[in-house]
Image (spheres, rainbow, N blue to C red):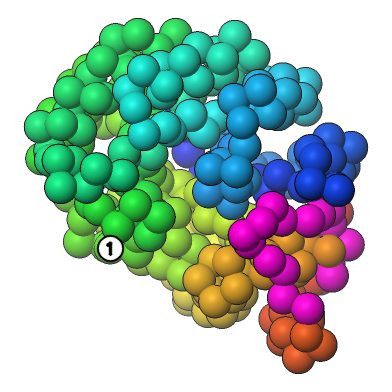
Amino acid sequence: MSKPFAGVIPPVVTPFKNDELDLEAFKANFSQWNKVPLGGYLVAGTAGESPHLSAGEKEKLFAAARELIPNDRAFLAGIGAQSTRDSIELARIAGAQGADYALALTPFYFRGQMTGAAWEAHYRRLADESPIPVVIYNGTPSSGLNITPDTVARLSEHANVAGVKCGAGNLAQLRQFVRLTPEDFAVLTGAAAIYYPALCVGVDGCGAAVGNLAPATMIALERAFKEGDHSRAMELQDLIAPLGGMVSKRWGVGGLKLAMDLAGRCGGEVRMPLTKPSDENTKDILLAEFAKLAKMENDYL
């Protein structure tokens, strides 16, 4: 059975200018990314500063993205909210603007009550009422919580639940997500540092922040794996991992946006309380790491 989506699906950044959406910069990034055979895009995800966006701003981003994303690539919209009601409303907005899938972060604020049963009830109601298929986002780095494979397995039986993205680099859990869910259920890792081993345990793709900066390199890794060239895949993994760690863990979204600016993409401003690194040493480190991948990226762009 075919998967609903697969491949490299970057969670795209949301550029800001003077603390407002910079849709021209947003569009300029897509003009570059669309030259690369990506599996799709995630709009208003973690790297897109989803918690800093109003519902109205997400609606504008979804509308703009629909015009920019080719029809043969998946369009995932970040709609996760702390209440089921708000998640459903955002899913309706995403569907109305042409998104293909609604990616919903596990609610976490009332963490003592966020049990498997609570999440299962949340996702079932969301899937019942969403006009587009739902993707579970197990965003442990953001939420501090973890949805278990058995809960995901039960939810995968729902006709309107299409997949799961796992933000943490937990290979054992990724394997359980793959093993316990149907063949037409998509499993993504969100960790670029483990993309090669994640492919080895059966994942369908990667939704990592570094895909904003080095999508061609990630696709080359995936292609080498599928062609059985494991030594090449591991070589590319070793190139991607340091940069991926810098723009996701070490400096976060601010570091990612700075790296994009340095590489000639449109990172733009972040929204407070996030900040972009400003010291020259950080810039030198990011440039040095991107330089290792630059030829492969520029050959596409």
128 vs 113, left or right, is right
Q: What percent of the width, then of the height, locates residue 73? A: 62, 29
Characterize the local packing of mark 1: few (<14), some (14-19) or many (20 or more) Cα atoms within 10 angstroms. Answer: few
As displayed, is residue 62 above or below residue 286?
Answer: above
As displayed, is residue 178 above or below residue 275?
Answer: above
Picture quarter with the C terminus = bottom right
- Residue at the (31%, 39%) spot, across then down: 106
Q: Nearer the viewer, residue 240 or 60?
A: 60
Q: What percent of the width, then of the height, locates residue 72? A: 64, 24
As displayed, is residue 53 above or below residue 70?
Answer: below
What secondary structure characterizes most of the magenta part? loop
Disc 1 residue type?
Answer: Asn
Q: What percent of the width, then of the height, locates residue 289? A: 70, 81
- Residue at the (15%, 47%) spot, across then down: 112
- Residue at the (46%, 25%) spot, across then down: 102
Quadrant hosting residue 270? bottom right
Per the rendered image, the range of residues in magenta is 262-278
66 vs 295, left or right, is left
Within the magenta stretch, is there residue 34? Answer: no
Q: Nearer the viewer, residue 93 or 98?
A: 93
Residue holding disc 1: 170
Picture quarter with the N terminus = top left
